[in-house]
Amino acid sequence: MSPRSRSRAAVLLATGAAVAAVVVASCGRTTSSSGVGSATGSDAASKVYIAPGQLDEFYAFVSGGFSGNMPVYAMPSGRLLRDIPVFSQYPEKGWGYSEQTKAMLMTSWGFVPWDDAHHPELSMTDGVPDGRWVFVNANNTPRVARINLNTMETDEIIEIPNSAGNHSSPFVTQNSEYAVAGTRFSVPIPQEDVSIADYKTKFGGMLSFIRIDPTTGRMGIAFQVRMPGFDYDLAHAGKGPSHGWAFFTSYNSEEASTLLERNASQNDKDFIAAINWKRAEQCVADGKAKETPARYAHNAFGEDHVAKTTWETSTKVLEPKDCDGLVYFLPTPKSPHGVDVDPSGEFIAAGGKLASVIPVHSFARMTKAIEAKAFEATVKDIPVLKYEEIISCEVKEPGLGPLHTEFDDKGNAYTSHFISSEVVKWRVKDCQVLDRIPTYYSLGHIMIPGGDSRKPWGKYLLAMNKITKDRYLPTGPELNQAAQIIDISGDKMKLLLDFPTIGEPHYAQGLLASVIKDRQVKTYPLADNKDPNRATSEKDAKIVRKGNRVDVHMTAIRSHFMPDNIEGIQVGDSVYFHITNLEQDWDVPHGFAMMGAQNAELLIMPGQTRTLTWVPQRLGVYPFYCTDFCSALHQEMQGYVRVSPKDGAPAIAYNTPK
Ligand code: K7E
Ligand code: CUA
């Protein structure tokens, strides 16, 4: 049986109550037949059990939160497949340490080695994840990254100017025309030295639209929309009928600048900002946007697979007053966090952290209200639509602290509740609550594969909890966060699995494995290696001294380096080890570690060149070696560097192939 049909059979079994009773009786366990909470009987185990040698059905790309990176798990097993380095230096991969990758972490503030990653978002074609790229935002020093799903490597990172706390990001439009980026912390725009007490007059928000090249994926900021000084928290783009719009939640419509927990919780309703980005495109084309100076970093790998920083110098800024029809406010109770658009594109659900209902706006009603000018007010040149005119229904008494909603393929929505630690399932068309299940504990985001797209795969829900407490063996003051997999294939949700995560997962995206599994790059062809310091055969290995700088062009292949004996290096030199891995086999990286190197080691993929800098400090002879167990003679994969005094060192000498 294929893994897929096996798990289908398990679902069928589990849904037959009589069969379930037999299972319960036969294993002598008491499992709740309600499917709530404790229903982790043997049927649950069989649903997440992937036998040795079998593959999972889904990939899950999960944010690492404060780790700044993006772990990849398999679903339903919860197995960790990889941790993709993005916004943080990552020793295991040499990310941000090797000369080829350092520039990826460059910003207008200089080199930033650690950030806070929140929302993975898959690229889409016609509103369905197409498996080309996954984007993710850096929250602290505002940036958006693009990860190539064929190599699972970060290919590009762009900084977002005029922004602070890039949280409502990087949600993409239906055909990945844009990824959005909204400022969470309003700031003076442009930055200037003003009193914080002048918040209401001097501070502003900015919603940025990053254009994505449909062929290469290359990003560029197309335009920015200048907004009132609220906190723009989350976003999702429209699809289907609402394609052409993007929705951003905001809190702090009070424009408080101190003790926000009280001062930004005064108003009964804050706003969702509905941006008509097709209208924005017109206004930009009509010259309504102001070219505004801004210096920001744009980092990308070139053809040579070496990251380079391009310095961008301006953006186009649109003001709502100069572009009528660009933006409307949808009143939304109360300090809303998530905003999620259902698969049909008609319904827009918001998670008001302090609200007693989940409001569901109707896009059709919103359009009618705009045509009828059903405005209750204008706030800073932006029309506020009447709540009663746009609402479809409200989910009453859902749970406490609703945050985020995902959708299945059967017209149902699932909302995470932080305070009451539960997932609540409700029907989109009439807001009826259908089911609820506790999670352990304090649930943030949830993810259903394809659950924010036009075609959710359904089947499983990944719950990402903030608090772990007693779920695993204790590990001192810090516990890894707790993820849980919940079966959503039947009427009742069932908890299947707990597993710990790396960092703090916020959002995640899931994808049917078959979409990308067979396109995974297995090696980098040596013939395509364009690194300026490559050595694509042992005959090309060489060492070149220019003043204090020594370039070592070295090769690695099972099970030796060429050269492996180096003399003529002087104390205080800057030695650049450029190592090319000559292997052309899948899964044969070589490592490189130099004794006393103060920055890092390297891990070099087949066909790739990676560079480590080393400044020798002491006289003597020091070893280097391969750190990745690559063959039976891996231990023999070693070499020596002789370090001599500045004056009186021998000439550079090294061995060459026989
Ligand atoms: Cu709710 Cu950053 Cu999306 Cu965390 S955010 S949970
Ligand atoms: Cu190469 Cu171990």
Image: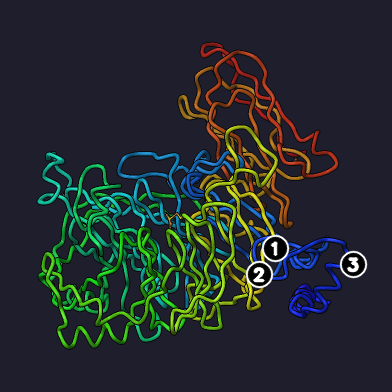
Q: Which residue is mark 3?
A: 26
Q: Residue at x 60, y 13 (%)?
A: 619
Comes first in the chain, label 3 or label 2: 3
Count neighbours of disc 3 (C-alpha within 10 A) and say few if under 14, some if 14 to 19, many if 20 or more: few
Looking at marks 3 and 1 on the same chain, the residue that comes earlier in the sequence is marked by 3
How was this image coloured? rainbow
Between 289 and 377, the residue placed more toward the observer is 377
Q: Is mark 3 within 8 Å of ligand 1?
A: no
What's under tag 1, amino acid-wise? Leu
Residue 133 sits above or below residue 553 on the image = below
What residue occupies the far right of the structure in this picture? 26
Q: Which residue is mark 1?
A: 496
On the image, which quarter does residue 644 sit in?
top right
Q: Amino acid at mark 2?
A: Asp
Instruction: Work out whether residue 638 can be spotted.
Output: yes
Horizontal relation, residue 342 to residue 635: left or right: left
C-beta proximity under 8 Å, tags 2 and 1: yes
What SS does tag 1 mark? Answer: strand
Q: Quadrant of the N terminus?
A: bottom right
Q: Which mark is residue 487?
A: 2
